[in-house]
Image (cartoon, rainbow, N blue to C red):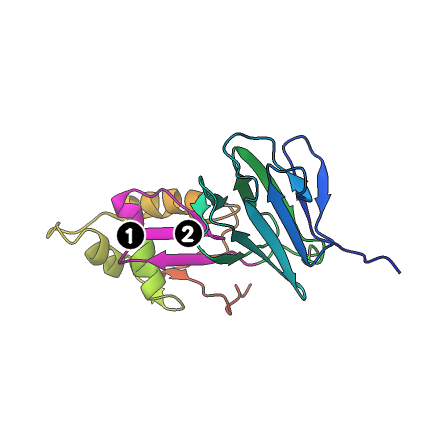
Amino acid sequence: MPETNVPYLEDPLGNEHMLDFDITHLGRSVENEVVIISNRASREHAIIRRDGRKVFLEDLNSTNGTFLNGERVLGSAQLRDGDEVMVGEVVFKFHDPDTTTRETPFPELEVNVEAGEVRLNRRRLSLSPKEFALVAYLYENRGKVCSKDDIGRAVWSEYQSGIFDYQIENLVRRLRTKIEIDPNDPQLLVTVRGLGYKMLGKMEETVE
């Protein structure tokens, strides 16, 4: 009986390359299951390996590297539905039909203060210094209500005379455009009326 719900790569022309082998080879050589027509692709460039329901991307020490969502793959990286894989100059989109599509998954936010990086669903965001300071403070205190006074002291520590509410509200609005799928219906950074703002963690849900 043929396997259903097979993950696949979609190339820039909309062609679907089914990943129905335990290991699928990508590269410039015609012997690969997925042939990459690019001078920047190595003959044997990368593989996609299936391990049960999980799918992994691995670079084969290629000259120009393999990239997942714009980041070079070192070793092995697990693929998730919607990821972008670049081999040579060709960008594929990974699709996993087993991914639940009945409801929008909760956004995955990662904040690395030491590296100065913020990622949403594994994609690096470009934030202003104040936006980064705000998301770092809320992320550190996720699950807790943070008042505007607390936010003002944390984000604008250089000002001793205090910060106006509209400055905080504008910063929150700008940050939401970066970290929320729908800024008008926030899932991560919610307003707690009369108290302040709260960053929700993965296990928390907004209560109506």
* Quarter the C terminus occupies: bottom right
Tell me if residue 24 can be seen: yes
Which amino acid, by three-letter code, is at mark 1?
Answer: Gly
| Three-letter amino acid code of the residue under disc 2 | Arg
Mark 2 packing: few (<14 Cα in 10 Å), some, or many (20+)?
Answer: some
Cα distance in 3D space between marks 1 and 2? 10 Å
Residue occupied by mark 2 = 119
Q: Quadrant of residue 29?
A: top right
Q: Nearer the viewer, residue 31 or 166?
A: 31
The outermost residue toward the right is 1
Please tell me whether mark 1 sits on a helix, a strand or a loop. Answer: loop
Is 137 on the left-hand or right-hand side of 186?
Answer: left
- Residue drawn at (68%, 42%), measured in percent from left and top? 31
Q: Nearer the viewer, residue 85 or 36?
A: 36
Question: What residue is disc 1 on?
Answer: 116
Q: Quadrant of residue 104?
A: bottom right
Q: Which residue is rendered at x = 43% and y = 42% of the image?
A: 177
Q: Position of residue 101 (x, y in %)?
A: 69, 54
Residue 126: give x, y in percent of width and height. Answer: 36, 42
Q: Residue at x 52, y 36 (%)?
A: 88
